[in-house]
Image: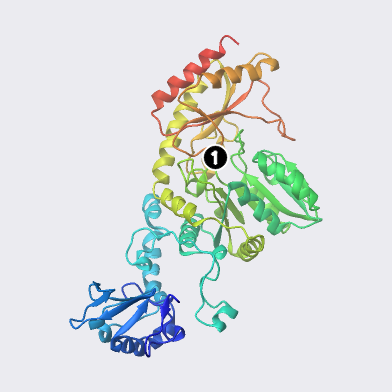
Amino acid sequence: MSSVQRAGSLPSRRELGYHSLKWIDGQVLTPQIAAKSGKLLNQLEKQARITVFGHSMIKNGSGKSALNGAPDNGRVTNLGLTAKPAAFKNRRFIPRNQKAQGFMKDRKDMLAGAGTDTKLCHIGHDPSSFHGFVNPPVVHASTVLFPDVKTMETRAQKYTYGTRGTPTTDALCEAIDALEGSAGTILVPTGLAAITVPFLAFLSAGDHALIVDSVYSPCRHFCDTMLTRLGVEVEYYDPELGAGIQSLIRPNTKLVHTEAPGSNTFEMQDIRAIADVAHKHGCVVTMDNTWATPLYFRPLDFGVDISIHAATKYPSGHSDILMGTVSANAAHWDRLREANITLGICGSPDDSYMILRGLRTMNLRLEHHGRSALAVAEWLEGRDDVARVLHPALPSFPGHAIWKRDFKGASGIFSFVLAADAPEKFKPKARAFLDELSLFGLGYSWGGFESLAVMVNLEDRRIRKAPSEGPVIRLQIGLENVEDILADLQRGFKATAAV
Protein backbone atom coordinates (compact mmCIF):
# COMPACT_ATOMS: atom_id res chain seq x y z
CA MET A 1 0.00 0.00 0.00
CA SER A 2 1.50 3.36 -1.00
CA SER A 3 1.88 6.17 1.51
CA VAL A 4 -0.66 8.27 -0.40
CA GLN A 5 -3.51 6.41 -2.12
CA ARG A 6 -6.08 7.73 -4.54
CA ALA A 7 -9.68 7.74 -3.37
CA GLY A 8 -12.32 8.51 -5.94
CA SER A 9 -11.10 11.42 -8.06
CA LEU A 10 -8.25 12.38 -5.71
CA PRO A 11 -5.53 14.18 -7.70
CA SER A 12 -2.56 12.21 -8.98
CA ARG A 13 0.95 12.42 -7.56
CA ARG A 14 1.84 15.00 -10.20
CA GLU A 15 -1.20 17.16 -9.48
CA LEU A 16 -0.79 16.84 -5.76
CA GLY A 17 2.96 17.42 -5.65
CA TYR A 18 2.76 16.26 -2.05
CA HIS A 19 6.44 16.51 -1.32
CA SER A 20 6.64 20.14 -2.46
CA LEU A 21 3.59 21.73 -0.86
CA LYS A 22 3.17 23.63 2.37
CA TRP A 23 0.70 26.26 3.59
CA ILE A 24 1.55 29.94 3.39
CA ASP A 25 2.42 29.70 7.09
CA GLY A 26 4.78 26.94 6.11
CA GLN A 27 5.28 28.00 2.49
CA VAL A 28 5.32 26.47 -0.97
CA LEU A 29 8.57 25.35 -2.54
CA THR A 30 7.86 25.31 -6.29
CA PRO A 31 6.09 27.79 -8.59
CA GLN A 32 4.72 24.94 -10.76
CA ILE A 33 2.81 23.52 -7.82
CA ALA A 34 1.62 26.97 -6.79
CA ALA A 35 -0.06 27.45 -10.17
CA LYS A 36 -2.13 24.30 -9.62
CA SER A 37 -2.96 25.00 -6.00
CA GLY A 38 -6.35 26.66 -6.49
CA LYS A 39 -7.82 23.76 -8.45
CA LEU A 40 -6.21 21.27 -6.12
CA LEU A 41 -7.71 22.78 -2.97
CA ASN A 42 -11.18 22.83 -4.46
CA GLN A 43 -10.84 19.15 -5.30
CA LEU A 44 -9.62 18.26 -1.84
CA GLU A 45 -12.41 20.22 -0.20
CA LYS A 46 -15.01 18.17 -2.06
CA GLN A 47 -13.46 14.83 -1.15
CA ALA A 48 -15.35 12.90 1.47
CA ARG A 49 -12.42 10.61 2.11
CA ILE A 50 -8.68 10.52 1.48
CA THR A 51 -6.17 7.94 2.63
CA VAL A 52 -2.96 8.91 4.34
CA PHE A 53 -0.33 6.31 5.29
CA GLY A 54 -3.00 3.62 4.86
CA HIS A 55 -5.48 5.26 7.28
CA SER A 56 -8.84 6.74 6.32
CA MET A 57 -9.44 10.41 7.05
CA ILE A 58 -13.13 11.35 6.84
CA LYS A 59 -14.53 14.85 7.10
CA ASN A 60 -17.45 14.74 9.47
CA GLY A 61 -20.52 16.90 9.40
CA SER A 62 -19.05 19.55 11.66
CA GLY A 63 -16.29 20.26 9.21
CA LYS A 64 -13.77 18.36 11.31
CA SER A 65 -11.71 15.45 10.08
CA ALA A 66 -11.00 12.21 11.83
CA LEU A 67 -8.21 9.70 11.52
CA ASN A 68 -9.68 6.27 12.27
CA GLY A 69 -12.40 8.05 14.21
CA ALA A 70 -10.06 10.29 16.22
CA PRO A 71 -10.60 14.09 16.09
CA ASP A 72 -7.97 15.90 14.04
CA ASN A 73 -8.78 19.53 14.92
CA GLY A 74 -10.31 20.21 11.52
CA ARG A 75 -7.07 19.55 9.61
CA VAL A 76 -6.71 17.30 6.59
CA THR A 77 -3.09 16.20 6.42
CA ASN A 78 -1.32 14.74 3.43
CA LEU A 79 2.46 14.20 3.50
CA GLY A 80 3.76 17.75 3.44
CA LEU A 81 0.30 19.32 2.98
CA THR A 82 -1.63 20.58 5.96
CA ALA A 83 -4.97 22.24 5.26
CA LYS A 84 -7.96 23.57 7.15
CA PRO A 85 -10.99 22.47 5.06
CA ALA A 86 -13.18 25.42 5.94
CA ALA A 87 -10.52 27.84 4.83
CA PHE A 88 -9.48 26.18 1.54
CA LYS A 89 -10.90 28.90 -0.70
CA ASN A 90 -9.35 31.69 1.34
CA ARG A 91 -5.86 30.20 1.37
CA ARG A 92 -3.31 30.86 -1.31
CA PHE A 93 0.01 29.25 -2.05
CA ILE A 94 3.18 31.16 -2.84
CA PRO A 95 6.65 29.99 -3.79
CA ARG A 96 8.84 29.66 -0.72
CA ASN A 97 11.73 31.47 -2.32
CA GLN A 98 9.50 34.40 -3.32
CA LYS A 99 8.59 35.04 0.30
CA ALA A 100 12.02 34.23 1.67
CA GLN A 101 13.93 36.52 -0.69
CA GLY A 102 12.70 39.67 1.01
CA PHE A 103 13.17 38.17 4.45
CA MET A 104 16.74 37.10 3.76
CA LYS A 105 17.63 40.44 2.17
CA ASP A 106 16.36 42.28 5.24
CA ARG A 107 18.34 39.90 7.47
CA LYS A 108 21.56 40.41 5.49
CA ASP A 109 21.12 44.18 5.63
CA MET A 110 20.52 44.00 9.37
CA LEU A 111 23.60 41.85 9.99
CA ALA A 112 25.91 43.83 7.72
CA GLY A 113 26.89 46.27 10.46
CA ALA A 114 26.05 44.11 13.46
CA GLY A 115 28.47 43.06 16.19
CA THR A 116 30.08 39.64 16.38
CA ASP A 117 27.72 38.17 18.96
CA THR A 118 24.67 39.42 17.06
CA LYS A 119 25.93 37.83 13.85
CA LEU A 120 26.61 34.53 15.56
CA CYS A 121 23.07 34.52 16.92
CA HIS A 122 21.44 35.01 13.53
CA ILE A 123 23.62 33.56 10.75
CA GLY A 124 22.43 30.26 9.28
CA HIS A 125 19.10 31.02 10.90
CA ASP A 126 15.83 31.29 8.94
CA PRO A 127 12.82 30.35 11.08
CA SER A 128 10.42 31.20 8.23
CA SER A 129 11.72 28.14 6.37
CA PHE A 130 10.86 25.82 9.24
CA HIS A 131 7.42 26.89 10.46
CA GLY A 132 8.89 29.42 12.89
CA PHE A 133 11.10 27.03 14.83
CA VAL A 134 14.26 28.79 15.99
CA ASN A 135 16.72 26.04 15.05
CA PRO A 136 16.73 24.21 11.71
CA PRO A 137 15.71 20.56 11.93
CA VAL A 138 18.19 17.73 11.54
CA VAL A 139 17.42 16.36 8.09
CA HIS A 140 18.74 12.84 7.50
CA ALA A 141 18.73 11.98 3.83
CA SER A 142 20.12 9.86 1.08
CA THR A 143 17.22 9.73 -1.41
CA VAL A 144 15.45 12.93 -2.41
CA LEU A 145 12.26 12.62 -4.47
CA PHE A 146 11.51 14.47 -7.72
CA PRO A 147 8.02 15.53 -8.87
CA ASP A 148 8.47 14.25 -12.45
CA VAL A 149 11.00 12.76 -14.85
CA LYS A 150 11.97 16.08 -16.43
CA THR A 151 12.94 17.55 -13.07
CA MET A 152 14.85 14.39 -12.25
CA GLU A 153 16.76 14.46 -15.54
CA THR A 154 17.65 18.14 -15.29
CA ARG A 155 18.02 18.13 -11.49
CA ALA A 156 16.03 21.35 -11.52
CA GLN A 157 15.41 21.50 -7.80
CA LYS A 158 17.51 22.58 -4.86
CA TYR A 159 18.11 19.16 -3.30
CA THR A 160 18.90 16.06 -5.34
CA TYR A 161 20.80 13.67 -3.04
CA GLY A 162 21.90 13.63 0.58
CA THR A 163 25.63 14.02 -0.16
CA ARG A 164 24.96 17.24 -2.04
CA GLY A 165 23.36 19.08 0.83
CA THR A 166 20.33 19.17 3.10
CA PRO A 167 18.59 22.07 4.86
CA THR A 168 20.71 21.29 7.94
CA THR A 169 24.09 21.30 6.21
CA ASP A 170 23.07 24.31 4.12
CA ALA A 171 22.30 26.28 7.27
CA LEU A 172 25.81 25.66 8.58
CA CYS A 173 27.43 26.46 5.23
CA GLU A 174 25.52 29.74 5.04
CA ALA A 175 26.67 30.61 8.56
CA ILE A 176 30.32 29.87 7.76
CA ASP A 177 30.08 31.89 4.54
CA ALA A 178 28.78 34.84 6.55
CA LEU A 179 31.77 34.60 8.90
CA GLU A 180 34.40 33.98 6.22
CA GLY A 181 33.06 36.33 3.55
CA SER A 182 33.27 33.41 1.13
CA ALA A 183 31.37 32.51 -2.03
CA GLY A 184 30.74 28.97 -0.83
CA THR A 185 31.64 26.44 1.85
CA ILE A 186 31.87 22.66 1.87
CA LEU A 187 31.63 20.46 4.94
CA VAL A 188 33.92 17.47 5.42
CA PRO A 189 34.14 14.87 8.20
CA THR A 190 37.44 16.04 9.78
CA GLY A 191 39.80 18.98 9.97
CA LEU A 192 42.44 16.99 8.08
CA ALA A 193 39.98 16.37 5.24
CA ALA A 194 39.49 20.13 5.07
CA ILE A 195 43.15 20.33 4.02
CA THR A 196 43.37 17.28 1.78
CA VAL A 197 40.24 17.99 -0.30
CA PRO A 198 41.43 21.40 -1.62
CA PHE A 199 44.91 19.93 -2.21
CA LEU A 200 43.33 17.23 -4.38
CA ALA A 201 41.11 19.82 -6.04
CA PHE A 202 43.90 22.14 -7.18
CA LEU A 203 46.96 19.89 -7.59
CA SER A 204 47.78 17.40 -10.35
CA ALA A 205 50.68 15.15 -11.29
CA GLY A 206 53.71 17.23 -12.21
CA ASP A 207 52.70 20.21 -10.07
CA HIS A 208 54.87 21.80 -7.39
CA ALA A 209 53.37 22.79 -4.01
CA LEU A 210 54.88 25.02 -1.33
CA ILE A 211 53.87 24.02 2.20
CA VAL A 212 54.80 25.99 5.32
CA ASP A 213 57.24 24.03 7.50
CA SER A 214 55.18 24.68 10.66
CA VAL A 215 52.22 22.88 9.12
CA TYR A 216 49.85 20.57 11.02
CA SER A 217 51.76 17.28 11.24
CA PRO A 218 49.08 15.00 9.67
CA CYS A 219 49.02 17.39 6.70
CA ARG A 220 52.76 16.86 6.27
CA HIS A 221 52.22 13.10 6.34
CA PHE A 222 49.57 13.41 3.60
CA CYS A 223 51.94 15.50 1.49
CA ASP A 224 54.91 13.18 1.96
CA THR A 225 52.92 10.05 1.17
CA MET A 226 49.78 10.45 -0.92
CA LEU A 227 50.59 13.70 -2.76
CA THR A 228 54.07 12.44 -3.58
CA ARG A 229 52.64 9.13 -4.81
CA LEU A 230 50.24 11.06 -7.06
CA GLY A 231 53.18 12.84 -8.69
CA VAL A 232 53.05 16.19 -6.87
CA GLU A 233 56.39 17.63 -5.76
CA VAL A 234 56.17 19.09 -2.25
CA GLU A 235 58.61 21.64 -0.86
CA TYR A 236 58.53 23.10 2.66
CA TYR A 237 59.36 26.73 3.36
CA ASP A 238 60.28 28.89 6.35
CA PRO A 239 57.11 30.33 7.96
CA GLU A 240 58.79 33.74 8.33
CA LEU A 241 59.77 33.96 4.66
CA GLY A 242 57.02 36.41 3.71
CA ALA A 243 57.45 37.97 0.26
CA GLY A 244 60.74 36.08 0.01
CA ILE A 245 58.69 33.09 -1.10
CA GLN A 246 59.24 34.54 -4.57
CA SER A 247 62.60 32.73 -4.67
CA LEU A 248 60.92 29.32 -4.29
CA ILE A 249 58.21 29.63 -6.91
CA ARG A 250 58.73 27.64 -10.10
CA PRO A 251 56.85 27.60 -13.41
CA ASN A 252 54.93 24.52 -12.20
CA THR A 253 54.14 25.85 -8.70
CA LYS A 254 50.36 25.68 -8.38
CA LEU A 255 49.60 25.96 -4.67
CA VAL A 256 51.00 27.75 -1.62
CA HIS A 257 49.73 26.53 1.74
CA THR A 258 49.93 28.71 4.85
CA GLU A 259 49.10 28.26 8.52
CA ALA A 260 49.28 31.10 11.01
CA PRO A 261 50.10 30.80 13.75
CA GLY A 262 52.06 27.64 12.94
CA SER A 263 51.16 24.32 14.47
CA ASN A 264 52.63 23.79 17.98
CA THR A 265 55.35 26.47 17.71
CA PHE A 266 53.05 29.33 16.61
CA GLU A 267 55.26 31.14 14.09
CA MET A 268 53.43 34.01 12.41
CA GLN A 269 53.26 34.51 8.64
CA ASP A 270 52.81 37.64 6.55
CA ILE A 271 49.79 36.23 4.74
CA ARG A 272 49.09 39.22 2.51
CA ALA A 273 52.71 39.40 1.29
CA ILE A 274 52.75 35.68 0.51
CA ALA A 275 49.38 35.83 -1.27
CA ASP A 276 50.41 38.81 -3.41
CA VAL A 277 53.53 37.01 -4.65
CA ALA A 278 51.71 33.72 -5.19
CA HIS A 279 48.94 35.33 -7.23
CA LYS A 280 51.44 37.01 -9.55
CA HIS A 281 52.45 33.51 -10.58
CA GLY A 282 48.92 32.10 -10.78
CA CYS A 283 49.16 30.02 -7.61
CA VAL A 284 46.22 29.09 -5.41
CA VAL A 285 46.72 30.18 -1.78
CA THR A 286 45.25 28.06 1.00
CA MET A 287 45.32 28.74 4.73
CA ASP A 288 44.61 26.68 7.83
CA ASN A 289 42.92 29.27 10.04
CA THR A 290 41.81 26.99 12.86
CA TRP A 291 43.74 28.82 15.61
CA ALA A 292 42.19 32.24 15.03
CA THR A 293 38.80 31.25 13.58
CA PRO A 294 37.19 33.80 11.22
CA LEU A 295 36.30 35.86 14.30
CA TYR A 296 39.94 36.88 14.81
CA PHE A 297 41.27 36.59 11.25
CA ARG A 298 39.49 36.43 7.89
CA PRO A 299 41.91 34.85 5.38
CA LEU A 300 40.00 35.86 2.26
CA ASP A 301 40.34 39.52 3.26
CA PHE A 302 44.12 39.06 3.12
CA GLY A 303 44.28 37.50 -0.33
CA VAL A 304 43.82 33.83 0.57
CA ASP A 305 41.71 31.85 -1.92
CA ILE A 306 40.74 28.90 0.27
CA SER A 307 40.14 29.19 4.04
CA ILE A 308 40.43 25.93 5.97
CA HIS A 309 39.01 25.40 9.44
CA ALA A 310 38.81 22.41 11.77
CA ALA A 311 35.32 22.99 13.13
CA THR A 312 36.19 20.19 15.56
CA LYS A 313 37.84 22.90 17.66
CA TYR A 314 36.18 26.18 18.67
CA PRO A 315 32.95 26.00 16.61
CA SER A 316 32.16 22.67 18.26
CA GLY A 317 33.57 23.67 21.62
CA HIS A 318 32.77 20.46 23.49
CA SER A 319 35.34 17.87 22.33
CA ASP A 320 32.67 15.60 20.84
CA ILE A 321 32.40 16.50 17.14
CA LEU A 322 34.68 15.88 14.16
CA MET A 323 34.21 18.24 11.19
CA GLY A 324 36.09 20.52 8.84
CA THR A 325 34.96 23.46 6.72
CA VAL A 326 36.53 24.71 3.50
CA SER A 327 35.49 28.16 2.25
CA ALA A 328 36.43 29.54 -1.16
CA ASN A 329 36.33 32.89 -2.90
CA ALA A 330 34.24 33.25 -6.06
CA ALA A 331 37.11 32.44 -8.44
CA HIS A 332 37.79 29.05 -6.83
CA TRP A 333 34.40 27.95 -5.52
CA ASP A 334 33.19 25.95 -8.53
CA ARG A 335 36.34 23.84 -8.74
CA LEU A 336 36.36 23.16 -5.01
CA ARG A 337 32.70 22.20 -5.04
CA GLU A 338 33.11 19.91 -8.05
CA ALA A 339 36.11 18.14 -6.48
CA ASN A 340 34.19 17.59 -3.27
CA ILE A 341 31.24 16.07 -5.14
CA THR A 342 33.61 13.85 -7.13
CA LEU A 343 35.29 12.59 -3.96
CA GLY A 344 31.91 11.91 -2.34
CA ILE A 345 32.84 13.57 0.93
CA CYS A 346 30.27 15.34 3.10
CA GLY A 347 29.52 16.36 6.66
CA SER A 348 26.77 14.63 8.61
CA PRO A 349 23.51 16.44 9.47
CA ASP A 350 23.80 15.61 13.17
CA ASP A 351 27.30 17.07 13.41
CA SER A 352 26.25 20.07 11.33
CA TYR A 353 23.43 20.79 13.75
CA MET A 354 25.78 20.60 16.73
CA ILE A 355 28.38 22.84 15.09
CA LEU A 356 25.69 25.37 14.18
CA ARG A 357 24.52 25.39 17.79
CA GLY A 358 28.11 25.80 18.98
CA LEU A 359 28.57 28.87 16.79
CA ARG A 360 25.98 30.77 18.83
CA THR A 361 28.30 30.89 21.85
CA MET A 362 31.68 30.69 20.12
CA ASN A 363 32.66 34.31 20.63
CA LEU A 364 31.84 34.18 24.34
CA ARG A 365 33.86 31.00 24.76
CA LEU A 366 36.73 32.22 22.59
CA GLU A 367 37.06 35.41 24.61
CA HIS A 368 37.25 33.37 27.83
CA HIS A 369 39.78 30.93 26.34
CA GLY A 370 41.94 33.77 25.05
CA ARG A 371 41.84 35.85 28.22
CA SER A 372 42.75 32.89 30.42
CA ALA A 373 45.46 31.66 28.04
CA LEU A 374 47.18 35.04 27.97
CA ALA A 375 47.11 35.21 31.78
CA VAL A 376 48.68 31.75 31.98
CA ALA A 377 51.28 32.65 29.32
CA GLU A 378 52.31 35.77 31.24
CA TRP A 379 52.58 33.73 34.44
CA LEU A 380 54.77 31.15 32.71
CA GLU A 381 56.99 33.84 31.24
CA GLY A 382 58.04 34.89 34.73
CA ARG A 383 59.21 31.43 35.80
CA ASP A 384 62.86 30.34 35.87
CA ASP A 385 61.93 26.77 34.93
CA VAL A 386 60.41 27.99 31.64
CA ALA A 387 62.90 28.75 28.85
CA ARG A 388 60.43 30.36 26.43
CA VAL A 389 56.71 30.94 25.96
CA LEU A 390 55.41 30.56 22.41
CA HIS A 391 52.34 32.81 22.29
CA PRO A 392 51.82 35.40 19.50
CA ALA A 393 50.06 37.87 21.82
CA LEU A 394 53.13 38.23 24.04
CA PRO A 395 55.32 41.24 23.11
CA SER A 396 58.38 39.02 23.55
CA PHE A 397 57.26 36.63 20.80
CA PRO A 398 59.10 37.11 17.45
CA GLY A 399 55.88 37.26 15.39
CA HIS A 400 54.02 39.57 17.77
CA ALA A 401 54.11 42.58 15.40
CA ILE A 402 52.36 40.64 12.61
CA TRP A 403 49.79 39.26 15.04
CA LYS A 404 49.06 42.74 16.39
CA ARG A 405 48.75 44.19 12.89
CA ASP A 406 46.56 41.53 11.28
CA PHE A 407 44.67 39.65 13.99
CA LYS A 408 41.77 40.79 16.16
CA GLY A 409 42.48 38.45 19.05
CA ALA A 410 44.19 35.32 20.33
CA SER A 411 42.66 31.96 21.10
CA GLY A 412 43.37 29.59 23.97
CA ILE A 413 46.20 27.37 22.73
CA PHE A 414 49.94 28.01 22.94
CA SER A 415 53.17 26.27 23.92
CA PHE A 416 56.10 26.78 26.24
CA VAL A 417 59.62 25.36 26.39
CA LEU A 418 60.31 23.60 29.67
CA ALA A 419 63.87 24.41 30.76
CA ALA A 420 66.25 21.43 30.80
CA ASP A 421 70.04 21.51 31.01
CA ALA A 422 70.69 18.44 28.82
CA PRO A 423 68.88 16.80 25.84
CA GLU A 424 68.66 13.48 27.66
CA LYS A 425 66.49 15.19 30.29
CA PHE A 426 63.96 16.58 27.79
CA LYS A 427 61.53 13.66 27.81
CA PRO A 428 61.93 12.71 31.49
CA LYS A 429 61.18 16.29 32.56
CA ALA A 430 58.19 16.54 30.23
CA ARG A 431 56.80 13.22 31.46
CA ALA A 432 57.22 14.21 35.10
CA PHE A 433 55.45 17.50 34.47
CA LEU A 434 52.53 16.01 32.55
CA ASP A 435 51.98 13.01 34.81
CA GLU A 436 51.59 15.26 37.85
CA LEU A 437 48.76 17.30 36.32
CA SER A 438 45.24 16.49 37.48
CA LEU A 439 43.02 19.28 36.17
CA PHE A 440 44.65 19.19 32.72
CA GLY A 441 43.72 16.21 30.61
CA LEU A 442 46.37 14.48 28.53
CA GLY A 443 44.87 14.42 25.06
CA TYR A 444 45.01 15.66 21.50
CA SER A 445 42.90 18.34 19.83
CA TRP A 446 41.75 21.56 21.48
CA GLY A 447 38.93 24.09 21.54
CA GLY A 448 36.84 22.19 24.08
CA PHE A 449 35.80 23.33 27.54
CA GLU A 450 38.51 21.40 29.42
CA SER A 451 42.22 22.21 29.65
CA LEU A 452 44.57 19.81 27.86
CA ALA A 453 48.33 19.31 27.75
CA VAL A 454 50.59 17.36 25.42
CA MET A 455 54.31 16.99 24.75
CA VAL A 456 55.04 18.16 21.20
CA ASN A 457 57.07 16.11 18.73
CA LEU A 458 58.91 18.36 16.25
CA GLU A 459 61.21 15.78 14.69
CA ASP A 460 59.58 16.13 11.26
CA ARG A 461 60.48 19.81 10.84
CA ARG A 462 62.73 20.47 7.82
CA ILE A 463 63.52 24.19 8.09
CA ARG A 464 62.89 25.27 11.69
CA LYS A 465 64.33 22.79 14.15
CA ALA A 466 62.91 22.12 17.60
CA PRO A 467 63.96 24.45 20.45
CA SER A 468 67.26 23.44 22.02
CA GLU A 469 66.49 24.66 25.56
CA GLY A 470 64.08 21.87 26.48
CA PRO A 471 60.91 19.97 25.54
CA VAL A 472 57.93 21.81 24.08
CA ILE A 473 54.66 21.48 26.02
CA ARG A 474 51.45 22.57 24.32
CA LEU A 475 48.60 23.82 26.50
CA GLN A 476 44.95 24.15 25.58
CA ILE A 477 43.51 26.49 28.19
CA GLY A 478 39.90 25.59 28.87
CA LEU A 479 37.07 27.38 30.60
CA GLU A 480 38.14 26.61 34.17
CA ASN A 481 39.09 29.35 36.62
CA VAL A 482 42.60 30.67 35.99
CA GLU A 483 43.55 30.21 39.64
CA ASP A 484 42.81 26.49 39.43
CA ILE A 485 44.72 26.17 36.17
CA LEU A 486 47.79 27.84 37.66
CA ALA A 487 47.64 25.67 40.77
CA ASP A 488 47.65 22.54 38.62
CA LEU A 489 50.59 23.79 36.55
CA GLN A 490 52.46 24.60 39.76
CA ARG A 491 52.14 20.96 40.79
CA GLY A 492 53.60 19.92 37.47
CA PHE A 493 56.61 22.20 37.81
CA LYS A 494 57.25 20.96 41.33
CA ALA A 495 57.48 17.41 40.00
CA THR A 496 60.19 18.37 37.49
CA ALA A 497 62.56 19.67 40.16
CA ALA A 498 63.80 16.20 41.04
CA VAL A 499 64.51 15.20 37.41
Rendered location of residue 352, percent (x, y): 48, 54
Seen as rendered, the residue at the extreme left is 62
Q: Residue at 41% across / 78% down in the picture?
A: 4
Q: Position of residue 193 (x, y in %)?
A: 62, 50
- Quarter of the figure with the N terminus: bottom left
Above or below: residue 440 compared with residue 80: above
Q: Dividing the image into 4 quarters, which one contains the C terminus?
A: top right
Crowd class of label 1 (few under 14; some 14 to 19; many from 20; radius 10 Å): many
- The residue that label 1 is drawn on is 403
Tell me the colour scheme of the image: rainbow
Residue 16, quarter of picture:
bottom left
Q: Is residue 23 visible?
A: no
Counting from the top left corner in percent of width and height, residue 141 is at 51, 64
Viewer-closest of 62 and 206: 62
Residue 111 shows in this picture: yes
Q: Secondary structure at mark 1?
A: helix
Q: From the viewer's perspective, tell me whether residue 435 is left or right of residue 285.
A: left
Name the one closer to the observer, 395 or 461: 461
Q: How many labels sit on residues?
A: 1
Q: Residue at x 31, y 83 (%)?
A: 49
Would you place residue 368 above or below residue 91 in this image? above
Residue at the (47%, 54%) spot, across then down = 350
**39 left or right of 249?**
left
Q: Position of residue 440 (x, y in %)?
A: 48, 27
104 versus 458 height, above or below: below
Q: Nearer the viewer, residue 303 or 495?
A: 495
Residue type marked 1: Trp
Q: Left or right: where does residue 372 sit relative to residue 461? A: left
